[in-house]
Every structure is written in structure tokens, then in C-alpha cells.
């Protein structure tokens, strides 16, 4: 009785092994390539004994394994479709890989006994975009802070950014001078030596060294500024002294011009009103050498004088004119 039970269990075990061997299944192998390369998604399958493969198709799939769209990429019937093709081993080939090719791909088979099986796996695309640094030109005053930045894009991460100044890798070990030196380059206390042409190089695990991507070039211009603090105020003092000196010179020139104009005006006035020299003569006998004011008659001498005024109690004042002869 025990022997019969043992044989029965052994037969059941063999049946289970035979059932497992006859199960139809599919295994898909993913791939990881760089942009521009060729990718291969493998599809291996097992059929039940006596069954025959009737159809094999490749789809793009969602994360849950459902197909994207109803139309396959390639199949046993249509083995080529643009950049997609089916190899002799039933693998999916993707030529000139692009970033948007990344995702899930599903392989599905259909047998003559109407057995359907499928499997999917992920396809990874490694890429690194050329970084763009902004701003293209930056002017910074002395002792101020300058900043350039970029947005690294790629896979895998992290993406390492190296900054370059005037074609030489920038030493950013001084954290006080360069508090940020990854995607953003911060330069504290700007001075003349910081002026120059900057760019950066982006790298990740797939793109290192010469395969890294160089950015555009940007320029930092330093601007000198006059300061009023401490010894740095010399420029301001010099400037103020210059303004004061120029003001003084202007006032002096204006004063001299005023004096000159006044002198000219006074000279013109004097020329238009000349002084008349006069002389006083108390000698009565000398009256005959001059003429009296017209219309004034000296009763004692019976002479008339031109251009003279005579008062009763004052001596006559004579002008240098010739005496006028009396009419007889």
C-alpha cells in the first residue's frame, strides 16, 4: 500500500514537471545606449511541445505593461519601419537613438495553438545637452558680486559643471571668493583680475572628458568706481578739488571781465564829456587879451567877452580865447 502511494506521488510530480516545460513564455531584455547609437531589445520565448510560433510583434508600452497604441512598431509581417527593424533573432533594433526613444518596449507572441504571451522591459537613453550660460555679458563694479548660471540637462545624473576662464580651468577652491561653483558661478568681491571670458563644461557618467559638452562663452567686465570711504576716497577728493578750482578760476575771469567792461564804459563817458581847462586872471590890464561872455558888457572897459560869466563881487574867469574887438 505504501509503495502504491509513493508511485502515485512520483507520477504527479512528473506531470507537474511536464506541465511547466510545456508553458509558453517570453523574456525581454532591455538596453542602455547613448544618443545616436544603435539599441537592441532582445526577445526570447519558449513554446509548448508541438506548438509553432505564428506571430511576433513589438510595441511601445506603459509602465504597467499596457501597449501604447494598437499598431506595432515591427512584426514578422513588417520587419522594418523607419528607424525600427526586426533582427533575425526576433530582436528589436533601433537605429540613431534619440532621447524620446527612452521608455518601455513589449514583445508579444501568438502561437498556432492560440497561445499568447508577452513581456516588456525598459530602454534607457543616456544623453547630455550642451549647456547655455547666461547672461552673455555682465558688468560688475569693484567689490560687488557677479553671477553666471546654467541649467544642466541630461541623463544619468548627477551632471558635473566645471567653470573655465580664458580657456583655463577656474580654481574655485576659495569658498569665500566662489561660494557657488556648480550650475551657478558666484564671484564675490569682484576685482580687475576677474574680468575675462567664461564658459563651462558639463559631464556625467556617460559623457566624460572630451565627450563632455562645452557651453557658449560669456564675458565679465569690471567697472572701477570712485569711493568716499577711507583711502579709496582720493579720487572723489581730487574730483571735488578740481571742481572748486575751476569755479574759482571762473569767478576770477568774470571779475576781470567786469573790470574791463567798466573801464571801457568810463573811458567812453570821459571822451564824450571832455574837461575844459580854465584859468583865473585878476589883472585888469589883461582883460583886453580875452573876450567877455556874449551879451555881457563891461561898462568900465567897454569890452565884451565871449563865453564868460561875471558877477558883481567876483573876479571874471577867462577862457583861452582871443579878445573880440569892439565895433566903432
Image (cartoon, rainbow, N blue to C red):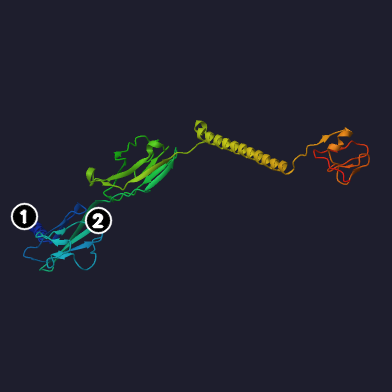
Q: Secondary structure at mark 1?
A: helix
Direction front: furthest residue: 328
Visible residue check, residue 228: no
Q: Secondary structure at mark 2?
A: helix
Visible residue check, residue 236: yes
Query: Which numbered circle lies on residue 297?
Result: none
The residue under the point 22% across, 44% down is 210
Q: Which residue is mark 2?
A: 99
Locate the N terminus by quadrant.
Answer: bottom left
Gap between marks 2 and 1 measured at Cα: 65 Å
Q: Nearer the viewer, residue 273 or 10?
A: 273
The residue under the point 17% across, 61% down is 84
Which quarter of the figure has residue 169? top left
Left or right, residue 273 beside residue 212: right
Left or right, residue 225 beside residue 293: left
The residue under the point 18% across, 64% down is 73
Left or right, residue 8 beside residue 318: left
Q: Nearer the viewer, residue 43 or 20?
A: 43
How far across and down, in percent of the image, does residue 89 sit? 10, 59
Q: Is residue 327 above or below residue 105?
A: above
Q: Are marks 2 and 1 in contact (CB under 8 Å)?
A: no
Q: Is residue 24 above or below residue 259?
A: below
The residue under the point 72% across, 44% down is 272
Q: Which residue is mark 1?
A: 3
Amino acid at each position: 500500500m505504501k509503495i502504491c502511494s509513493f508511485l502515485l506521488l512520483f507520477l504527479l510530480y512528473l506531470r507537474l514537471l511536464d506541465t511547466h516545460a510545456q508553458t509558453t513564455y517570453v523574456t525581454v531584455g532591455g538596453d542602455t545606449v547613448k544618443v545616436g547609437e544603435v539599441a537592441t531589445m532582445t526577445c526570447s520565448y519558449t513554446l509548448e511541445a508541438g506548438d509553432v510560433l505564428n506571430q511576433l510583434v513589438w510595441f511601445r508600452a506603459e509602465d504597467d505593461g499596457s501597449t501604447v497604441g494598437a499598431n506595432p512598431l515591427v512584426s514578422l509581417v513588417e520587419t522594418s519601419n523607419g528607424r525600427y527593424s526586426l533582427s533575425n533573432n526576433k530582436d528589436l533594433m533601433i537605429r540613431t537613438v534619440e532621447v524620446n526613444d527612452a521608455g518601455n518596449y513589449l514583445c508579444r507572441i501568438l502561437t498556432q495553438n492560440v497561445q499568447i504571451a508577452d513581456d516588456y522591459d525598459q530602454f534607457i537613453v543616456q544623453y547630455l545637452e550642451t549647456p547655455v550660460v547666461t547672461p552673455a555679458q555682465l558688468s560688475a563694479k569693484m567689490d560687488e558680486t557677479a553671477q553666471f548660471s546654467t541649467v544642466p540637462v541630461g541623463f544619468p545624473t548627477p551632471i558635473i559643471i566645471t567653470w573655465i576662464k580664458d580657456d583655463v580651468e577656474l580654481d574655485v577652491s576659495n569658498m569665500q571668493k566662489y561660494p557657488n561653483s556648480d550650475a551657478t558661478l558666484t564671484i564675490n568681491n569682484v576685482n580687475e583680475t576677474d574680468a575675462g571670458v567664461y564658459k563651462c563644461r558639463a559631464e556625467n557618467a556617460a559623457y566624460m572628458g572630451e565627450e563632455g559638452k562645452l557651453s557658449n562663452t560669456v564675458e565679465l567686465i569690471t567697472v572701477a568706481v570712485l569711493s568716499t570711504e577711507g583711502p579709496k576716497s582720493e579720487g572723489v577728493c581730487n574730483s571735488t578739488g578740481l571742481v572748486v578750482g575751476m569755479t574759482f578760476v571762473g569767478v576770477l575771469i568774470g571779475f576781470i571781465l567786469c573790470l574791463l567792461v567798466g573801464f571801457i564804459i568810463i573811458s567812453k563817458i570821459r571822451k564824450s564829456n571832455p574837461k575844459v581847462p580854465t584859468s583865473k586872471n585878476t589883472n585888469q590890464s589883461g582883460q583886453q587879451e580875452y573876450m567877455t561872455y556874449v551879451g555881457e558888457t563891461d561898462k568900465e572897459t567897454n569890452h565884451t567877452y565871449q563865453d564868460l560869466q561875471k558877477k558883481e563881487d567876483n573876479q571874471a574867469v577867462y577862457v583861452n580865447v582871443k579878445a573880440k574887438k569892439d565895433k566903432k
